[in-house]
Image: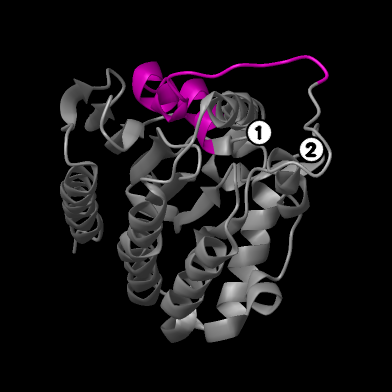
């Protein structure tokens, strides 16, 4: 049985469904598709929506790539992968809204498999989703985490949510800034206990993304804002760039394994700014964000 076939089919369908939903939510722009092939093996389809009514840029890519050698960053932690052929399939998205009151978001679901002499030496699932607000709203954060908690219910319930929520907080942490990238969500990697059950959890996370995000879009898309809020949004987008280029393992693996740079870097925002020594005014709307950039039990804190 080719266990990759149903995973691949699910992922391409997920990309289609998310694109349809985001186009409907935006109401103006459409995704443009870029089909590509990778010389070392495989390819993908990258879709980007630009200059929409809601989304300044929304990128979602499906990739099915393979190779015969893994970069040292991958084999250092997993020596059994040295010299193995590999294949990785996944969907990854990052949406950068225009309105500073609507959070940036990221989601990813993926499957990896390595073989040597025709025998599988390793396989696993990974993924998750996280939320990066600039002007946090407790109602949105509570909804986001309640949705994450609910989809974990058939797969270990509170214990699964607690573990993968904590993993998300730990992973999306800018060590050089001493802050989280946002208010977290779920993150998991190297899930390989039971193929059918683990694949079911992957689907729950992939399907749960729209349930978590679209209600926030509906609530915040028309919130009034001005130049001050826009400047703060662009400044905070700089943190997103810093994390992706310095700490994100997926970005590093993609670039080090000869991946397609345009597709890998579509996660970066279309506009961003840095400002030396910036500090928000005390007691301002911008100063509130700092209190949200530390791991917290959101379900208990927000009820």
276 relative to 164, above or below: above
Range of residues picked out in magenta: 250-277
Kindly report the distance in space between the C-alpha atoms of the residues bearing marks 2 and 1: 9 Å
From this view, report whether residue 37 is shown above or below residue 90: above
**Residue 111, percent from left and from top:** 38, 52
Q: Nearer the viewer, residue 268 or 123?
A: 268
Decide whether residue 256 is among the magenta residues: yes
Which residue carries the number 1 mark? Answer: 247
Q: Is residue 122 above or below residue 286?
A: below
Q: Position of residue 102 (x, y in %)?
A: 45, 45
**Residue drawn 54% across the image and 24% down it:** 227
Give the image quarter of residue 43.
Answer: top left
Which residue has dot 2 on it?
175
State the count of labels. 2
Question: Would residue 4 be found to the left or right of residue 254 on screen?
Answer: left
Query: Would you say the residues marked 2 and 1 are in contact, meaning their CB atoms lie under 8 Å apart?
Result: yes
Q: With respect to residue 4, does 106 lie above or below?
A: above
Residue 18 coordinates in the image, percent (x, y): 23, 50
Disc 1 is placed on an element classified as: loop
- Determine if the magenta segment contains residue 211: no
Front one among 111 and 250: 250
Q: Earlier in the sequence, mark 2 or mark 1?
A: 2
Left or right? Give the position of 233 relative to 90: right
């Amino acid at each position: 049985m080719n266990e990759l076939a149903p995973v691949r089919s699910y992922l391409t369908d997920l990309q289609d469904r998310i694109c349809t939903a985001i186009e409907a939510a935006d109401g103006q722009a459409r995704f443009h598709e870029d089909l590509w092939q990778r010389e070392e093996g495989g390819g993908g389809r990258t879709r980007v929506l630009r200059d929409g009514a809601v989304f300044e840029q929304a990128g979602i890519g499906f990739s099915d790539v393979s190779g015969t050698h893994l970069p040292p960053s991958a084999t250092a932690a997993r020596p059994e992968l040295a010299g193995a052929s590999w294949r990785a399939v996944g969907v990854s998205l990052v949406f950068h809204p225009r309105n500073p009151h609507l959070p940036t978001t990221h989601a990813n679901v993926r499957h990896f498999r390595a073989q040597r002499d025709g025998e599988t030496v390793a396989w696993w699932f990974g993924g998750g989703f996280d939320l990066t607000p600039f002007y946090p709203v407790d109602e949105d954060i509570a909804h986001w985490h309640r949705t994450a908690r609910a989809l974990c219910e058939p797969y270990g319930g509170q214990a699964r949510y607690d573990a993968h929520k904590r993993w998300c907080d730990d992973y999306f942490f800018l060590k050089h800034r001493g802050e989280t990238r946002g208010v977290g969500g779920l993150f998991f990697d190297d899930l390989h206990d039971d193929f059918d059950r683990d694949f079911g959890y992957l689907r729950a996370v992939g399907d749960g993304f729209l349930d978590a995000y679209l209600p926030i879009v509906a609530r915040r898309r028309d919130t009034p804002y001005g130049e001050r809020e826009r400047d703060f949004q662009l400044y905070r987008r700089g943190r997103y760039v810093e994390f992706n280029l310095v700490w994100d393992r997926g970005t590093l693996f993609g670039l080090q394994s000869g991946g397609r740079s345009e597709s890998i870097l579509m996660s970066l925002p279309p506009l961003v700014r840095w400002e030396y020594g910036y500090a928000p005014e005390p007691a301002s709307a911008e100063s509130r964000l700092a209190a949200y950039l530390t791991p917290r039990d959101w379900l208990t804190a927000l009820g």
